[in-house]
Image (cartoon, rainbow, N blue to C red):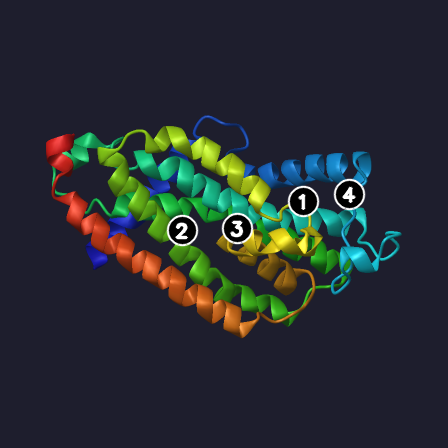
Amino acid sequence: MSRWFFLFSQWFKRDLGGRYRGSWLGLAWPILQPLAQISVFTLVFHFFMNMRWPLAGVAFDQDPGGTSVLSATEYGLNVLAGLAVFNFFAEVLSRSPSAIISQPSLVTKVRFPLALLPIVTAAVAMLHILSAFCIASVVLAILGKISWVMLWAIAWLIPIALYGLGLSLILASVGVYVRDIGQIMPAVNSLLMFLTPIFYPLNAIPLQLRGLFEANPLAWASESLRQILLNNQNLVFSDWVTHFFISAAVCGAAIVLFRGLQRGFADVL
């Protein structure tokens, strides 16, 4: 087990260091990138397109005049919560299919726990969520709205991590045999962006379509993170339990699939 942790830490540092090697700002980019994103999206959607975000508990149809809406800063924080979730899953989906095939020497020439490659991919992608926590905590502290309820984010993170890990293992193992998966993922990410309530609250979706959006785990993740960080509301325990068991099942199935497909990696590569 200690060997696994050592290899994980070394590969994590290698992956993270390689991403920002040669850049002037280095590890400041995980903070600067989401700041730039929410600044642009807030400018475009809140100011240019006049996108409004009702206060917690106020539905769109209850406030047709848009009088009970959040400020630009609060709108940006809501966008940040949605972007953190989306960016995490988008990176897992885009990078996982090549996690194994990009390291053929580890498959064919040395003994290496190959499951570490997609695990590290998911772990590095988690920086999107951690950086969002840091940004939101600082802004909320400045606004005087920070609360102990934010500790619920630890429980919230468990099914998110399991979903990400399961997806990474599945895509990495299947991607060895089906190289087209890597080409499909950009289109999948584009679709997910519009099916995830990033720039708008979930209650803005018409009732006849809301079930489709609620079936998306990213929608639950985004809305729950907003409840915890921005609305000082506890997690809805029944929803959390549901997603915990689903994510655990996905992760368990992914482990079984990875172990089964791993036997043929060397033959394919």
The mark found on residue 129 in the picture is 3
Dot 1 falls on a residue whose secondary structure is: loop
Q: Position of residue 184 (x, y in %)?
A: 40, 31
Which residue is at 25% across, 54% downward? 255
Secondary element at tag 3: helix
Mark 2 crowdedness (10 Å alpha carbons): few <14, some 14-19, many ≥20: many
**Residue located 65% across and 69% down the image:** 233
Q: Are the two marked residues, 4 and 1, in contact with CB atoms closer than 8 angstroms?
A: yes
Taking the image as shown, residue 242 lies to the left or right of residue 132, namely left
Q: Nearer the viewer, mark 4 or mark 2?
A: 4
C-alpha separation, residue under disc 3 versus residue under disc 4: 24 Å
Which of disc 3 and disc 2 is earlier in sequence? 3
Q: Answer with mark 2 or mark 1, whichever residue precedes in sequence.
A: 2
The reply to whether residue 242 is in sight is yes
Q: How many marks?
A: 4
The label on residue 51 is: 4
CA gap between label 1 and label 3 equals 17 Å
User: Comparing marks 1 and 3, which lies closer to the viewer?
Assistant: 1
> Disc 3 residue type?
Ile
On the picture, is 35 further left or further right than 104? Answer: right
Residue 164, numbered label: 2
Q: Name the residue tied to disc 1.
A: 199
Q: How far across and how far down the image is residue 40, in percent?
A: 70, 34
| Cα separation between marks 4 and 2 | 30 Å
Q: Nearer the viewer, mark 2 or mark 3?
A: 2
Distance between mark 2 and mark 1 Cα atoms: 22 Å
